[in-house]
Image (cartoon, rainbow, N blue to C red):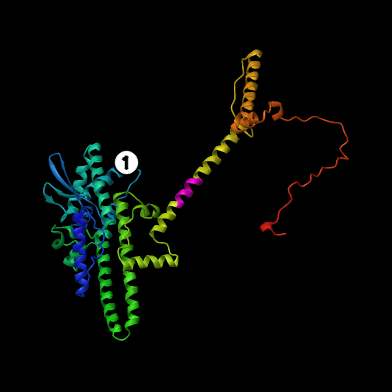
Amino acid sequence: MVAAAESYAVEQEKLSKQLEGNSEIHIQAPKEPEVNPALYRDVEPMLFRGFLTLTARINGVIFVFKSLNQHEYELLGFTGGMQTDAIATQKFWDIFLAYGVFMIDGVNILPEREKFIPKIAEAFAEFPPDARQRVIRHLSEVNRRANNAVTITECYSSEIYSRFRWAQIKGLDPTSTAVTGIHGTERLGMNWAQHVWRALNYYEDRNEEHDREWENAKFIGSCMVGKGIQKVYHQDTERRRKERDERLARKDRLLRQVYMGESADDKAQQLQGAVVVAARSVDELAGQLEKDLRGEKDWHDQVVEAQEQRIRTNLQGRRDHLEQLVQSHEQEFGRKTITGGTNIAGLTAIEVQERILRTKQLEFQAAARGMVHPELADPKMNAFIDKWGMTDAEVGSSLSETDKDISNVVPIILPQTNPRGTPFGKK
């Protein structure tokens, strides 16, 4: 407690000195959530090499396999694709494995791959079926990782080190040997990850150029119409904040889609764990207040709405289940009310009579338990009877029938014994 009080006093002293000296108070702005670079381990090879690799030893020979790009898949489609004929199917997979070979025993086959592909396909055709299927499964896993890398290339392009790499190779062919360091990669063509990365960086450069020109225009306008340009500054700040939040939310959805298996279009799941930038400043709190006054829904309102929708869905599911039970009961028993049953087949008449008597006995016992005796249930009633010396016969009452004519009966009006008084003694 003492240490905390001392640190608090030191901070207060610093703030007072800043206010007395009219110095600026610096508050650290919130940073964007950082992504572990290990998540992009497959993206950089796809961008700066062109493919992913897998090393295997087959019969003492070291093979280095690589992932296939869209151009190679198109070439495989020209071979006939997956046909019903067993021979054509086996030939397709042999060519698929041949296209996936990068190096054989330390020799790069990419510069003259067209010459080696038929020989490699024939070599794979001689493999046992189990061994060939095992190689196909491993190569398919590499291609699956390559497809995921294409998906999260958009996330990678928003990182600062991605912009550094773009500045390094901007204007160069990403498939050239000068970029990849591997002879023959220019014969493979650009993959989808490289296309996406180049397009996103191109538009980011355009946005930066447009923002720079727009800032210059606002600076010139502020010299003439200062107050009017101030509103434009606030609008630009709000627009940039919304763009940043949308970019972070989309990055979160894509990463969850690849590494957690969640659907990118499932908004209900994203609301449970999306990247949310909470209000950390007065401006952001004021923005939330304005949204509340305008009746707009913020993230918290969406979470509450999703929870209410989930509760309504559960209730509707229970109602549907009960309706299904009622329908199945009607189909099985009809309109009969089934409260239980007993199989009396094989019972004698005496046994049936005993069961009937036992049932009536239980009914009478239940009725007796339901009767209430005031003199027994209420202690005050017992005390009243003992005080005035009343008997059980006097407590109870009985009604007897009569055959007298009741048409001339006149009700008796009792005189008022206590006249009504006047308030405050006034007459």
Q: Is residue 199 left or right of residue 370?
A: left
Q: Secondary structure at mark 1?
A: helix
Q: Is residue 311 magenta?
A: yes
Residue underneath mark 1: 86
Determine which quarter of the picture holds residue 304: bottom left
- Residue 198 in the image: state x and y as whole percent: 24, 65
Residue at x 65% of width, y 13% of height: 350
- Quick check: 258 above or below 219? above
- Residue 272 in the image: state x and y as whole percent: 36, 52
Magenta span of residues: 308-316
Residue at x 67% of width, y 30% of height: 388
Q: Is residue 159 magenta?
A: no
The kind of secondary structure the magenta stretch mainly shows is: helix
Q: Amino acid at mark 1?
A: Ala
* Frontmost residue, 109 versus 387: 387
Q: Is residue 93 left or right of residue 331?
A: left
Regarding residue 337, the answer to whether it shows in the image is: no
* Frontmost residue, 71 versus 282: 282
* Frontmost residue, 116 versus 282: 282
* Frontmost residue, 361 versus 299: 361
- Number of numbered markers: 1
Around disc 1, counting alpha carbons within 10 Å, would you say few (fewer than 14), some (14 to 19), or many (20 or more)? few
Quadrant in which the C terminus is drawn:
bottom right
Residue at x 20% of width, y 63% of height: 11
Q: Is residue 128 left or right of residue 227?
A: left
Determine which quarter of the picture holds residue 215: bottom left
- Residue 380 in the image: state x and y as whole percent: 60, 33
Regarding residue 345, the answer to whether it shows in the image is: yes
- Residue 409 in the image: state x and y as whole percent: 86, 40
Q: Residue furthest left?
A: 106
